[in-house]
Image (tube, rainbow, N blue to C red):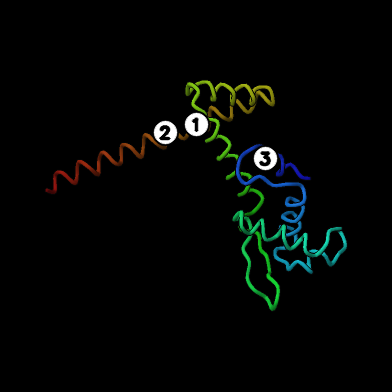
Amino acid sequence: MTKAFSIFGSGSRPHLGPFEQQVLQKLWSQGSATVRELLADGKIHQAYTTVMTTADRLYKKGLLDRVAEGRAFRYTPRHTPEELQRVTALESIRQLLGSGDASSLPLSYLVEALSSHDAQLLDELQLLVETKRRELQSRENNNKVRDAKGREQR
C-alpha cells in the first residue's frame, strides 16, 4: 500500500482492513465504479458479494457515496486520500490529547516522535505553532475591537 495508508489500523476511526483499503484505493484511481466495474480488470480476486459487502461497509463508515444505477450502486469516494489522512491524523491526535494524562505528556510524545523521525520536522512544528499563535492572537484582537464597537453603539 502507499504511504497514505500508514494511518489505518492505528486505533482511530475509521479502521480499515486490508481489503477495504484495496477497494478504496481502486475507487480513488477510477473515480467511481460499480462492484462489477471494480472486478472487471481481474485485479480483485474476491467474490462479487464480498466486494459488494465491503463497498457497503465503506459506505456505512462514511467513506463512500453511492447512487442507484439500475439494480446496482455506483460508489464514489467521499474524501481524497489526503483528506482522509488529515481527518484520521486529527482524530488520533485528539484521542492522544484527551487520554487523561497531564496535558504536556502527550505533547512530549509528539515531539519525541518528530525528533526521532526527522529533526527538521521540529523546526517546521515550531513555525506552525508560531503561525497559529499569531493567527489566534489576531482573531482575539479583532473580537475585542468588535466587542468594544458594539458597546459604543448601544
Residue 139 sits in quarter: top left
Residue at the image position 53 percent from the left and 21 percent from the top = 105
Residue occupied by mark 2: 134
Residue lying at the far bottom in this picture: please name it: 70
Nearer the observer, 124 or 32: 32
**Which element type, helix, strand or loop, lies under badge 2?**
helix
Residue at the image position 64 percent from the left and 26 percent from the top = 114
**Number of residues whose C-alpha sits closer than 10 Å to that of mark 3, classed few (under 14), some (14–19) or many (20 or more):** some
Nearer the observer, 30 or 37: 37
**Which element type, helix, strand or loop, lies under badge 3?**
helix
The percent coordinates of residue 13 (x first, y second) are 60, 44
Q: What residue type is labelled 2?
A: Arg
> For the residues carrying marks 3 and 1, which lies nearer the camera in this image?
1
The percent coordinates of residue 127 (x first, y second) are 53, 30
Q: What residue type is labelled 3?
A: Ile
Q: Which amino acid does label 1 sit on?
A: Gly
Residue 3 sits in quarter: top right
Residue occupied by mark 1: 98
Residue occupied by mark 3: 7
Question: CA–CA distance between discs 3 and 1?
Answer: 19 Å
> For the residues carrying marks 2 and 1, which lies nearer the camera in this image?
1
Tally of numbered tags: 3
Question: Along the polypeptide, which appears first: circle 2 or circle 1?
Answer: 1
Tell me if 131 is positioned left or right of 34 in this view: left
> For the residues carrying marks 3 and 2, which lies nearer the camera in this image?
3
Question: Along the polypeptide, which appears first: circle 3 or circle 1?
Answer: 3
Residue at the image position 70 percent from the left and 76 percent from the top = 71
The percent coordinates of residue 136 (x first, y second) are 39, 36
Residue 117 circle label: none
The percent coordinates of residue 130 (x first, y second) are 47, 30
